[in-house]
Amino acid sequence: MLTKKAKEKMLQEVTEELKKSELVIVTDYRGLNVKAISALRGKLREQDCAYRVTKNTMNRLACRQAGVEELENLFEGPTAIAYSNADPVAAAKVFNDFSKENEALVIKGGLLSGQLLDPEGVKALGDIPSREVLLSRVVGGFQAPISGLVGVLHGTLGQLVYTVDAIRQQKESA
């Protein structure tokens, strides 16, 4: 049994996490064993994402104190919350992949930069390509026209050299 002081400290920690997190994902972990939850926590930790189980009453109070009352409706039944300040897409991707392997994990919804997400919204966020893939596509988009220009200039210069060489050969033979 937690003391009142310990509960207040935990409430303050949950409130701070809710305030500072870029992404919050609320899940129902019913049906997952300790091994599966530990595996999920490990994958989330790799993405700088924390996953914790706290009482729903405390979660609701923390939501009110953090000013994110819209999350309160998600706290029914066994609930765990993921908090991330890192890449929100990577954390959502972990949940998408994990829920494919473990159907017992149910994504209830989330909050991305103050915007409420339904379960489909969290799934859609996880389907977005990673930051590295998007950056490489942008760089590829910039690189393609430049490569094309280099190819055209190379072809034009090559034709000029062949033309000048043909003129030289013609003058030598005349």
Image (spheres, rainbow, N blue to C red):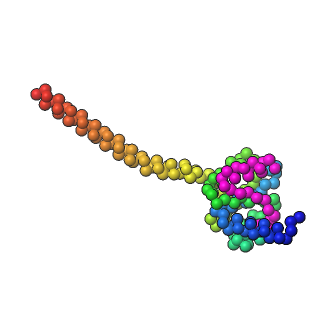
Give me the residue at 64% from left, 62% from top.
22
Q: Residue at x 53, y 51 (%)?
A: 134
User: In screen coordinates, is 80 left or right of 173?
Assistant: right
Residue 19 in the image: above or below residue 30: below
Spot occupied by residue 88 in the image (x, y as percentages of width and height): 63, 57
Q: Looking at the picture, how far across and down is residue 125, in whole percent?
A: 62, 56
Measuring 85% from the left and 71% from the top, which residue is drawn there?
4
Q: Position of residue 18 (x, y in %)?
A: 70, 66
Left or right: residue 115 compared with residue 102: left
> Above or below — where is 66 with respect to 139?
below
Answer with left or right where residue 83 lies relative to residue 158: right
* Residue 27: % across, % down: 74, 57
| Closer to us: 71 or 12 | 12
Is residue 77 at all visible to an observer of this figure?
Answer: yes
Residue 13 or 96: which is nearer the viewer?
A: 13
Is 139 displayed left or right of 52 in the figure?
left
Q: Main secondary structure of the magenta part?
A: helix
Which residues are the magenta region? Answer: 34-60
Q: Quarter of the image holding residue 113?
A: bottom right
The stretch drawn in magenta includes residue 109: no
Q: Is residue 38 magenta?
A: yes
Task: Indicate the quadrant containing the N terminus: top left, top right, bottom left or bottom right.
Answer: bottom right
